[in-house]
């Protein structure tokens, strides 16, 4: 369990006392002054609790804990001060959402009790978040599985971009990476309303007529509205809504949002989706990335640079042939998979598809009646 506690104070002697008295009860870290404290919150692994003195030069504890809340909303915040005035307490609670307000000098036993309660509060917050995220991921996986059955070619795109989402979110400093992962899973849901002819033209990189272009533009809006009906999915819906929006503000939806105002998830999807379209159209990955880099105004330059780093990590994966009976969840197809029926080959799943329990059951059912590609080439980590 995380019991890391950061104390922020401008008096080194007080900080030394905290380290001495609380050592063994908590994993104590200290920072001299507000700037050093905020730097540790930003750069270090998450703290369960941050305790800040109220009166410090340059920035008071209310402002410090408000910034802590912005950077690490799950971290529990405690105010400690020798000036126990009501106005300061009210300001701290209202502006920083403080868990406890303690006065100096504070007896060690009382401080230990307060910090123990704060760590428990952190545990409850994290448990609730893990439950929420787990429930949402399960629901989203179900929706994406439905899409995989209705539009396997489109789901293939989702499967191909999925491995890039998490590392790219991390490099881009995404504050809500799970939302971006969810947006990537559901960003193509709106394709269910598009005619096959429009999808075919888009996938082949063909120029769309004005009427087809207007129809195509509806897919992001439709997907965003569907997702917005799920509680606490507003951020995911917004990322989906802006997935086709250019960094310079052009594209759709046609509004004033541009640049860093666009959700980071939308900026990540903009790069990944166009990259996959280029690769699917026949471009080598290096060539596709070069095209992305040259797309001035289309993409967030920071996301493009980070994506280059992610692509450099792909050398850690290899392509190997695997017998159909040995296929497992999360293996990624390195080639199209076919079934032979009536003398004709019919595509079952596309290259780049991430296998799941549903698709594996579907493959097993097909294999009972007709020959399927066996073995099939899949992408696995090079250490496997």
Image: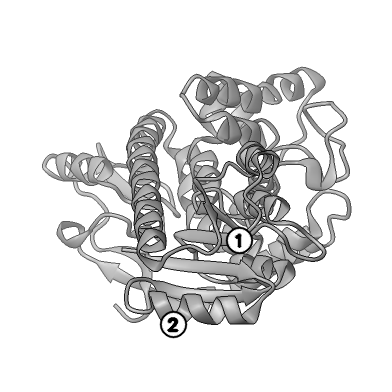
* Image-based side of 161 in relation to 307, left or right: left
Q: Quadrant of the C terminus?
A: bottom left
Callouts 2 and 1 close, C-beta under 8 Å? no
Q: Residue at x 44, y 32 (%)?
A: 151
Q: Nearer the viewer, mark 2 or mark 1?
A: 2
Kindly state the secondary structure of the residue where label 1 is placed.
strand
> Percent x, y for residue 260?
80, 48
> Percent x, y for residue 135?
33, 36
Residue corresponding to mark 2 = 20
C-alpha separation, residue under disc 2 versus residue under disc 1 = 17 Å
Q: Quadrant of the N terminus?
A: bottom left
> Percent x, y for residue 367?
16, 45
- Counting residues from the start of the chain, the first of labels 2 and 1 encountered is 2
Residue corresponding to mark 1 = 52
Q: Residue at x 37, y 38 (%)?
A: 132
Height in image: 313 above or below 263? below
């Amino acid at each position: 369990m995380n019991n890391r506690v950061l104390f922020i104070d401008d008096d080194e002697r007080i900080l030394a006392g905290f380290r001495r008295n609380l050592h063994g009860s908590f994993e104590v870290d200290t920072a001299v002054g507000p700037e050093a404290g905020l730097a540790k919150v930003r750069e270090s692994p998450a703290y369960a609790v941050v305790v800040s003195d109220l009166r410090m030069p340059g920035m008071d504890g209310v402002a410090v804990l408000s910034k802590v809340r912005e950077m690490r909303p799950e971290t529990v915040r405690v105010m400690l001060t020798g000036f126990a005035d009501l106005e300061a307490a009210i300001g701290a609670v209202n502006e920083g959402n403080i868990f406890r307000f303690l006065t100096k000098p504070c007896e060690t036993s009382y401080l230990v009790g307060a910090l123990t309660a704060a760590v428990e509060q952190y545990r409850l917050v994290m448990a609730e978040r893990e439950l929420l995220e787990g429930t949402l991921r399960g629901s989203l996986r179900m929706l994406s599985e439905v899409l995989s059955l209705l539009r396997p070619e489109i789901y293939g795109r989702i499967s191909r971009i999925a491995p890039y989402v998490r590392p790219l979110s991390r490099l881009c400093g995404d504050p809500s990476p799970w939302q971006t992962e969810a947006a990537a899973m559901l960003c193509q849901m709106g394709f269910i309303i598009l005619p096959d002819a429009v999808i075919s033209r888009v996938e082949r990189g063909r120029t769309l007529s004005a009427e087809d272009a207007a129809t195509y533009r509806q897919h992001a809006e439709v997907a965003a509205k569907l997702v917005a009906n799920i509680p606490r999915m507003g951020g995911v819906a917004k990322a989906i809504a802006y997935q086709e929006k250019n960094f310079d503000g052009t594209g759709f939806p046609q509004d004033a949002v541009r640049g860093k105002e666009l959700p980071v998830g939308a900026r990540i999807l903009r790069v990944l989706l166009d990259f996959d379209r280029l690769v699917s159209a026949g471009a080598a990955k290096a060539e596709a990335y070069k095209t992305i880099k040259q797309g001035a105004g289309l993409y967030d330059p920071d996301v493009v640079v980070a994506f280059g780093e992610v692509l450099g990590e792909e050398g850690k994966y290899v392509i190997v042939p695997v017998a159909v009976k040995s296929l497992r969840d999360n293996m990624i197809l390195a080639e199209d998979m076919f079934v032979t029926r009536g003398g004709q080959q019919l595509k079952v799943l596309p290259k780049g598809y991430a296998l799941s329990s549903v698709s594996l059951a579907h493959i097993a059912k097909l294999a009972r009646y007709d020959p399927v590609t066996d073995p099939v080439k899949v992408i696995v980590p090079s250490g496997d």
